[in-house]
Amino acid sequence: MGKTVQKTVRLEQLYLDDENYRLPESKLKQKQSALLRELWNTHEAQDIAVSVETGGFGNEDPIAVVKLEKPKNHYVVLEGNRRVAALKVLTETSSQKLVGYTPTNKVELPNGKIRVLVFSIRADTWRYIGRRHIKGPKKWDSVSKARFIFDTHENLKVPLDSIADQIGDTDRTATRLYHGYKVLKQAKKEGIFDYELVEKVKFSHLYTAIEKHQVLDFLGTTVDELRIQDEPVPQKRLPQLRKLFSFIYGDKKRKGVVESQNPDLRKLAICLTDPEYVERLDRTRNLNDTLAYVLKKSPEDVDPEDRRALKKLGKHKNKFFEGMSCPIKDDRLETLVYEISEINWTKLPTAASFLMRALLEAIVDHSIHKAGLTEALHAENIQRETDKGRPITSKDSRPNLRTCWEFLTRNKANIFNARAADSLGAVGSDQKLMHFIVHGYVKAHPAEVEKMGTKLRFFFESVLNGSAFMKNDNAKE
């Protein structure tokens, strides 16, 4: 990586990035005014502006930039576009008119300047940006991550293993996203599916599905083809690709049949093993009915591993999390909901309790973020630790669950409707649950786990489906 330099520059010297990975591809390569409106209206720059008006601008986290050849002494922002957009609206009359916003408080930058981290060339920034947005504290949505990995691998010729090493990826996330994005691009090119609509569904369904050998066989491709070929699905199998997208995401006339990764993707894979099963599923759009037909007619068509998993699923149902799904576009939440519905909590109560605590932590983070209070939480945490003689130097340092929970509880009236706030209060009044929130269980009994899950389920579900939040809020999606 080339040399980086920190300096301060005037806000007017900064250009928004027209290749920003947060933006859908149809919104790239636009004028500065269009980029500003897009970030303001659909990418939370307005929420950042409100936070800055209330608590001030934290200039300790520099904006990452690359110097432009023209105009002279100007820079394009590679990391921090939303913050720059928010500051432009708060300090520039022309930007305020552009988005129709009038600040309630005057915001001034220290000496009229903002701190930036200058990279030599754009190609030098992939490690820095990847660590922050793929596995780090400021995660992008799955499609943005996949596009970044695809561009880094294809354009900069960085091996996938090197990308994974640099971003701390230990579970093949980079490879899975890369493979999924290739299929997604091919589907768009062939007019099968416009992947910008994936903002409304779940990209993880696709890249998880194509890891299953039955799905690869259905598409007439292999893992090697996914890695090597620009268009991994053969032309003669494009009708199957269209069906796969229809089953997962639906089409113009019908809904998809996949509601959750577990167990629906496993069921779908089984139903793709024979044209007769595919025709039946396409006709009925009933995944359980088609699966029952397969198991009754040709149980030998089902892999032993799948038979065992389905049998276990029927025998050991998680009573208090049965049927819970995650409609939110968030890899962390979706993975935790999937894992907690998969685990046999009667046999593994301690593991289930720690999964539940991890899900609670993610739910609390999401609620605070959705309310636009993340900056306020971090500012409060920094002040508290400083008062205790333990100053925090990085805004990326995450407060612990206890701190986040107490913050959420104090602000519940401004975040949740009455029913959800009461549910939160009921959890807080349970001493055992509060001990769990603070410390976690070292050894849990199934009865304790069941009681805990029963109390938490309503709160979890209402946050996941959005019904917990006040209807007149400015919630983030």
Image (spheres, rainbow, N blue to C red):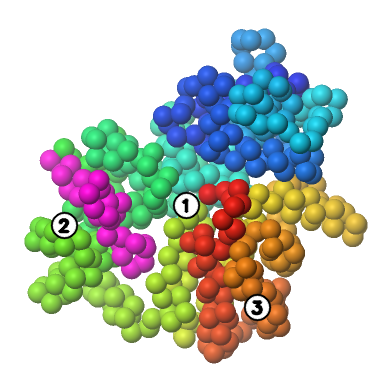
- Can you tell which of label 1 and label 3 is closer to the viewer? 3
Residue drawn at (22%, 49%) of the image: 253
Residue range in magenta is 236-265
**Is 26 rendered above or below residue 184?**
above
Q: Amino acid at mark 1?
A: Lys
Residue drawn at (67%, 26%) of the image: 96
Please name the residue that numbered disc 3 is placed on: 426
> Crowdedness of circle 2 by 10 Å Cα count: few (<14), some, many (20+)?
some
Compared across the picture, whether 365 is left or right of 26 comes to right
Residue drawn at (24%, 61%) of the image: 269
What distance separates the C-alpha of mark 1 from that of mark 3? 28 Å
Q: Amino acid at mark 2?
A: Asp
Compared across the picture, whether 98 is left or right of 112 comes to left
Compared across the picture, whether 148 is left or right of 311 comes to right
Tell me where residue 254 appears, x and y as whole percent.
24, 53
Please name the residue that numbered disc 1 is placed on: 329
